[in-house]
Amino acid sequence: MAASDTLDDVKSKGILWGFGMLTLVVLIVLLILGAWWGSEPGQFNILEAAHKRSEESKVETSHGSAATEAAHKPAEELDISEMPIGYVYTNTLAHIAEVLLHKSGGYITNDVAPPGVFLDNISNWEYGALVMLRDATTALRNHFARDQSQSAEDPDLAIAEPYFYYEHNSWALPSTEAEYQKGIESLHKYMSRLQKYGGPIKKAQFYSRADNLWQYTEVVIKRLGGLSTRLTANSAGGNYGPGLSDIEKLAADEKGTPITKVSWLEIDDIFYEARGASWALLHILRAIKHDFADILLDKRAMRTVDIMIKAMENALTPILSPMILDGSGYGLFANYSLTMANYISRANAAALDLRDIMNRG
């Protein structure tokens, strides 16, 4: 009887030990996948991406090998003279969407299983980039691709824009990825019509004018201002704590300024949303610098756009801490939210200057 009990105990311990090891292996795999999937995508060269897409489009029609070789040329050797105005801007939007869908781990926000369901930082990053993508696509449909307010809108852009406004966390019937992919395909059709047209194919239009850029800059100013305000409200040293006087609270209420400090659980969420928005806007600004080069040089506004680009590049400086720090202004630890707010405020100030320059006669 004693020997039988001992054998049962050994079996029970063996089962528990095996189950424990399996659980440990699963946790390690999830941690590794989580670290990989949660990493932010790097920057891409907008000219290389546009040239590659242009050559791929040629391959689809000619099935030649020369185009494939050209798609891998270094940036300094690229011949972008054949790409019409607006091609780089539109491809940048499409490529931003492609990065959202095909980065490591794919699109995370709508995941319902681990480890994706726990990766809130990259999910907020995706949302920040998505908002900037939506604004830029709307500007393309309503302003850049229309000669005047009473002009007919481009049919492909009229299809593409609504797809990017589909709910960002749907995992089935239809999934977010499927809808955004349709938007990408419609942008590619518009790009093809910028390059190749004739017969039944109507030429696509792109107007790089000062009034069009001014209208888009207005939207960027509001986005950057909102992000800066929310990041400042993250700060432990901000002016949104319980120490405000009644008069200060009343003044803040009238301005629509949030009074209460953001919960420490949401600090990293807002920070990573701002990182995603900065990443997307950085590439959009580079595309604007290329496709609106003539008007920017004519208005002497190229330096202003460079200031915005530099601020966005600084906002994307690699993070050295495993967590988002929220230290006081002169404390031992950095305050990531205030640092990010500083860079975004610089970009916002430059955007205000750009708006005024574009609005001048």
Image (spheres, rainbow, N blue to C red):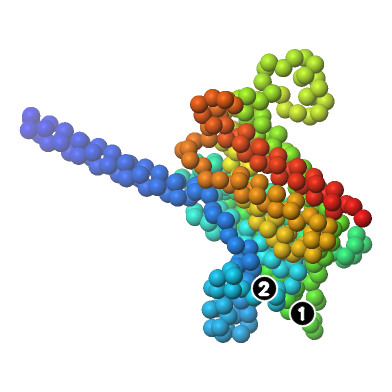
Q: Residue at x 80, y 45 (%)?
A: 352
Callout 1 crowding tier (Cα within 10 Å): few <14, some 14–19, many ≥20: few
Q: Is residue 182 left or right of residue 113?
A: right
Residue 358 is at least partly visible in this image: yes
- Comparing 242 with 166, the one in front is 242
Q: Which residue is mark 1?
A: 197
| Front in this rendered view, residue 167 or 218 | 218
* Residue at the (27%, 42%) spot, across then down: 21
Viewer-side residue, 294 vs 189: 294
| N-term mark: 1 or 2 | 2
Residue 56, located in which quarter of the rendered image? bottom right
* Label 2: how many Cα within 10 Å (few below 14, some 14–19, many 20+): some
Horizontally, is 55 left or right of 165 in the view?
left
| On screen, residue 315 above or below 44 | above
The residue that mark 2 highlights is 80
Amino acid type of the residue tagged 1 in the rendering: Tyr
Q: Identify the disc placed on residue 314.
A: none
For the C terminus, which image quadrant?
bottom right
Q: Indicate the position of residue 270 as horizontal and vertical percent values.
A: 62, 37
x 48%, y 40%: residue? 320
Q: Is residue 165 visible?
A: no
Dot 2 falls on a residue whose secondary structure is: loop
